[in-house]
Image: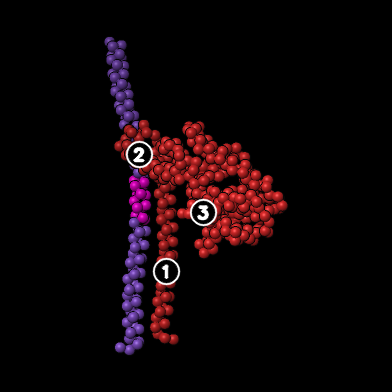
Chain colours: A red, B purple
Amino acid sequence: MNSSVLIFLFGVLGFLSYTFFTVIMYTNRRRTLSLLKLQVEKETESLLAEVEHIGQVELEQTQAGRELLEWRETILASRKSIAETTVAKNIALLRQVQPFSSLRQEDLRLLAPVIQIREYAPAQEIFLEGDRGNDLYCILEGHVLIYKRGEQGKRFGVRLFSASEFFGEMALLDDQPRSATAQAMTSTKVIMLNRSSFLDVVAKAPMVSLPMMRILSLRMRDFTDYSQVLAGRHGEDYNRIIAQQLLGLASRRGIATREGKALRMNIDLPLIEDLLMSMSSTEREIVKQVLSNLRDQGLVDIDDKENTLTVRDFAALFLRSAQGGNTA
Amino acid sequence: MSESTINVLVSGLMGIFGGMITISINGLISGFFKHEELLYQHQLDIIKMKKEKTLQHQMDIELQKISASNEELAKLKGEMAQLRAAVARLAGMAQR
């Protein structure tokens, strides 16, 4: 073997062994650090409890006691400042979501300490139909599909929610089991608000619930339209059903392009297909076929490279969805 | 220069540079961990000192209690001496 190759191999071997030992060292020291941190927290808590147990009146009688009181004040002040930072951060997050974005600062200050942030991986279920849940979710990042299972276990999409929207409000208001399943379609980050905390805040500041009520009333209107779509499913006319679902999606998720007439969807094509499949309770092949027909008719543009879909003419698609016509 | 000499020189240079990079990266990582460890260690030391302060406080309180009882005792002793003197005076008067 050539000596240059041998030297190169030795070099690679050295690098690998160095990386291996560095990773082990890093892991070990991180573990030590986290143990130390835990110990510090535990010791601080036990000392604080001891100081509380002795009591302020008795502590003020000695020099050592007064020093302990000073120490307690410092710890409590630093904790308060950390809590203040968290509240400020949470207020900024609450401003990003629909039901709370228009609230006053003082109302947000009531909500900020009680919210929690959760993250979900793609395809992970957030809650299941029938679960006893009492949390409201507001999406910060990602998309969440709400679906129900049909008689034969077939998924039936109800609605897609994206960043800044909220879901799970029914369990928050009526304390009943979940009426549908929520699944993260992409990497999703949400704000979680517990029922009892929310009701406490509403009791203090009733205006907090007003924007939510407004959105719920809009959703009721959407639901009426959706019922009409379902009522119009004569003979499984997928051309019409999928066109109607696409119209609904475009009206909510479409971004107007420069030409004005066209609406480019702000979600990826595979996700659009998933949604149409789920919301029309049909197969992917049928969805692909219908979309391809719509493209041939010049109603939509599909860019396979960019993974985007653009509704070229919203009005024409509306007419098409009203007329129907079987393709599948 | 022969090929083997060049190889030896190249490997030597690689070793020197590799070693330098390794030492600096290790130094950075170790420095970071050392700093964090020292911070936590310092906090633990403070807590230990404060625990000693609680003991000191308890001891001071006990001392205060003892000195208070000593004062009480001295007072009682004084009263007792006065009583004894009064008893002695009464006994003297009775004898007379």
Q: Is residue B37 magenta?
A: yes
The stretch of residues the image draws in magenta is: B36-49
- Measure the C-alpha gap from mark 2 to mark 3: 62 Å
**Chain letter of disc 2 in the image:** A
**From what the image shows, is residue B24 above or below residue A78?**
below
Quadrant position of residue B30:
bottom left
Circle count: 3
- Measure the C-alpha gap from mark 2 to mark 1: 46 Å
The disc placed on residue A327 is: none
Seen at 46% across and 43% down, the residue is A94
* Residue A44 picture location, percent across and down: 40, 45
Going by the numbered disc 1, the residue's amino acid type is Thr
**From what the image shows, is residue B66 above or below residue A324?**
above
Going by the numbered disc 3, the residue's amino acid type is Ala
Query: Which of the two labelled residues, at mark 2 and mark 3, occupies the earlier sequence position?
Result: 2
* Residue A52 picture location, percent across and down: 41, 37
Going by the numbered disc 2, the residue's amino acid type is Glu
Q: Which residue is mark 3?
A: A262
Q: Are the residues flagged by discs 2 and 1 in contact, CB closer than 8 Å?
A: no
* Residue A119 picture location, percent across and down: 51, 51
| Left or right of A314, for residue A47 | left
Residue neighbourhood size for the residue with mark 2, other residues' Cα within 10 Å, grouped as few (<14), some (14–19), many (≥20): few
| Left or right of B53, for residue A169 | right
The disc placed on residue A19 is: 1
Nearest to the eye among marks 2 and 3: give it.
3
Q: Which residue is mark 2?
A: A73
**Chain letter of disc 3 in the image:** A
